[in-house]
Amino acid sequence: MSTVEEDSDTVTVETVNSVTLTRDTDGNLILHCPQNVSENDQSFEVTMTATTEVADDEITEGTVTQIQILQNEQLDEISPLGNEEVSAVSQAWFTTKEDKDSLTNKGHKWKQGMWSKEEIDILMNNIERYLKARGIKDATEIIFEMSKDERKDFYRTIAWGLNRPLFAVYRRVLRMYDDRNHVGKYTPEEIEKLKELRIKHGNDWATIGAALGRSASSVKDRCRLMKDTCNTGKWTEEEEKRLAEVVHELTSTEPGDIVTQGVSWAAVAERVGTRSEKQCRSKWLNYLNWKQSGGTEWTKEDEINLILRIAELDVADENDINWDLLAEGWSSVRSPQWLRSKWWTIKRQIANHKDVSFPVLIKGLKQLHENQKNNPTLLETKSGSGVPNSNSNSSVQHVQIRVARLEDSTAISPSPMTALQIPVQITHVSSADSPAATVDSETITLNSGTLQTFEILPSFHLQPTGTPGTYLLQTSSSQGLPLTLTASPTVTLTAAAPASPEQIIVHALSPEHLLNTSDNVTVQCHTPRVIIQTVATEDITSSISQAELTVDSDIHSSDFPEPPDALEADTFPDEIHQPKITIEPSFNDAHVSKFSDQNSTELMNSVMVRTEEEISDTDLKQEDTPSPLARAYVTEALESPTIEEQVDQTTIDDETILIVPSPHGFIQTSDVIDTESVLPLTTLTDPILQHHREESNIIGSSLGSPVSEDSKDVEDLVNCH
DNA sequence: GCCAGCGGTAAGGGTAATTAAACAGA
DNA sequence: ATCTGTTTAATTACCCTTACCGCTGG
């Protein structure tokens, strides 16, 4: 995760690589992202693009997946599972079978197995929060130096929101913060010393570990691999025969039976004599059992089949896959464990598979194999030898997530927040042979649950540059923005950089000039058609409180053609008049009618208000305007020196609106969207998508780059401040 | 003294990533 | 025969669960 902070305008834009999306059982997509307590972020924007790159720079086809977070909202709950359930598990130490049974009988369930990235993020954020609350700099002080009594609430507190037993949290934290863990490969010298220490201290792993500068578990594990009697390398026939006999004997099974569980490998290794328990297990599960039971070879078709079968399972999390079930009756599968490892090699075809949600990963893999199937020559070109090579990096699918993190959930929620639940829409744009014709709009659930509003991200952003009155206008497209500038004495535009034609700097002589001007200033971008217009807005009665006055101007976005003044007045206390800038993408008629169909004024109001307050923040990466949800914490936010500085800078009296309508409008709302879910949202008017439709013939050459460039642009943008 | 709960250790089953060896084709 | 690139097998660092134990406070 790279973090770039801008001081003068308190604009913070982060690229958060570790953000992931998961889907809950209701179909809600959940954005998990680490929280950063030091910032006053307000919202998130996510753009996600998947592209297929073909070897030899022959980028001819691919998919674009775009995920846009349409609205941000804090959840009051820690976990979708519900607080009661979570707390019952995460506040219990239980390690015994009785404890477990007791909780199970009460209907509790909890997570087992490897910790997911999301969980680790939650844990880390909880720790951060704990440290901050107590003014402690380093967690190791608590973990390794404090007495039990001093840290008595530590583990319980940081376990919040994690559906794991307290003990699991404890283990995890110890490992994470123990710098004698993760030391890496043992050197021959260490092995020698370890042997000596083992003789001297027996199984006192703590002592041995201390002497070696390794954790107790590390030396214990290493000793398990060191058996003087162990052979290495290829197994002899005699050894294999012995292994098979021992396994069947100890499990009371017959040769040919499939045995994948319930084997005491320590006991097996003892009987085999020449191999360690891990060697025995690996040999059995990855080869011998399969061989004995008449297994067949794994083929390319099996690989595709595996992806499809996993996709059919429709699980939101990889951990939910039942590998035993999946492996059943599949002769080329050597064991469930083997199948899982096979899955791992397949997964790596997605270069950044770790950064994407499981459903997106599956989608990407399906697409990848679809492409390969449709165009077998790709495979041949890629594997020089002509052998289909599923593991080669010649066809790597990149799925990129760009996140501008603008919302600090920690500042909003008093409880240890763990995840943001944000309705997002994923649009799959398949653009193989005829990109323009295949706008495969595939929407992944938009059920918002308790969430009230959402946002349509316009494809451009205004970004304060740090110089009052100067903003960067940025689109998320790599395409250029031919401009027509309506003459204005006070506002000028320049390109941000020759290399970034999509960035335009909006200059005003001073904030006063921009905001107090009685002249309307119109800037028109031909592609995409964006008009920036400044108008005097005395008629707008809204104002914002001192607390909200954290930037030169609050920049607002709306998907309505005209800002509803009354609503704004409701939204902002009419106490102090401050300058406002509204960025307002217009939308096409189709969208209007769709939206109108979709019901109540109340809904529209709700959307409107929120849009005014939050959505523009998202779009503009302007984190300074607290969302309604954040208001309770405004006082706290104001204590930040950065914010105060900002307030001082804000000395403009009149209100001005910078209207940026986008005649391109929005893509029509998908029918999939449930109107009752308070999600009257549509796909975006995104220059990338637009670009694909309008200029399909050049899609091939630009497909792989726009978002990554854009992502870079975002960083550059902020860096330059 | 008893007991429940907490904090902790050790054993062992397991996973994921790396490395070594085998293999296929040019 | 040799080289090269790929696949498979083996290895190992690290992770997680489970059983169990000592301590503490009610």
Image: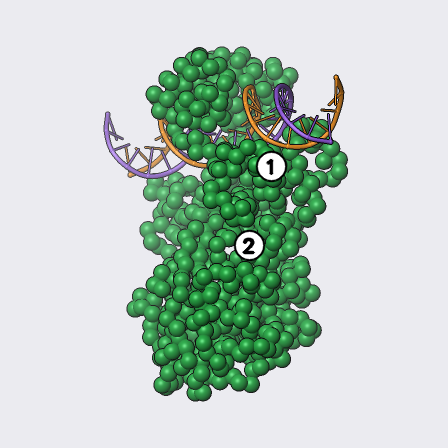
Chain colours: A green, B orange, C purple
For label 2, the residue is: A410
Residue closer to the observer: A502 or A338: A502
SS under mark 2:
helix
Task: Examine the rendering and report whether any part of residue A709 can be seen.
Answer: no
In this image, A59 relative to A162: left or right?
Answer: left
Task: Examine the rendering and report whether any part of residue A153 can be seen.
Answer: yes
Task: Name which residue type carries label 1.
Answer: Lys
Say which residue appears at 50% left-offset and 61% top-offset.
Answer: A639
Q: Give me the C-alpha separation between circle 2 and circle 1.
A: 23 Å
Residue A17: x and y in percent read 45, 51
- Find out whether the residues at labels 2 and 1 contact each other: C-beta distance under 8 Å: no
Task: Name which residue type carries label 2.
Answer: Thr
Please identify the quarter of the rendering in which residue A265 is found: top right
Residue B9: x and y in percent read 54, 23
Residue closer to the observer: A629 or A665: A629
For label 1, the residue is: A152
In this image, A678 relative to A684: left or right?
Answer: right
Residue closer to the observer: A444 or A617: A617
Up/down of A187 relative to A175, above or below: above
Q: Residues within 10 Å of mark 2 (few under 14, many from 20)?
A: many
If you read the primary sequence from the N terminus, does the residue marked by circle 2 or circle 1 appear first? Answer: 1
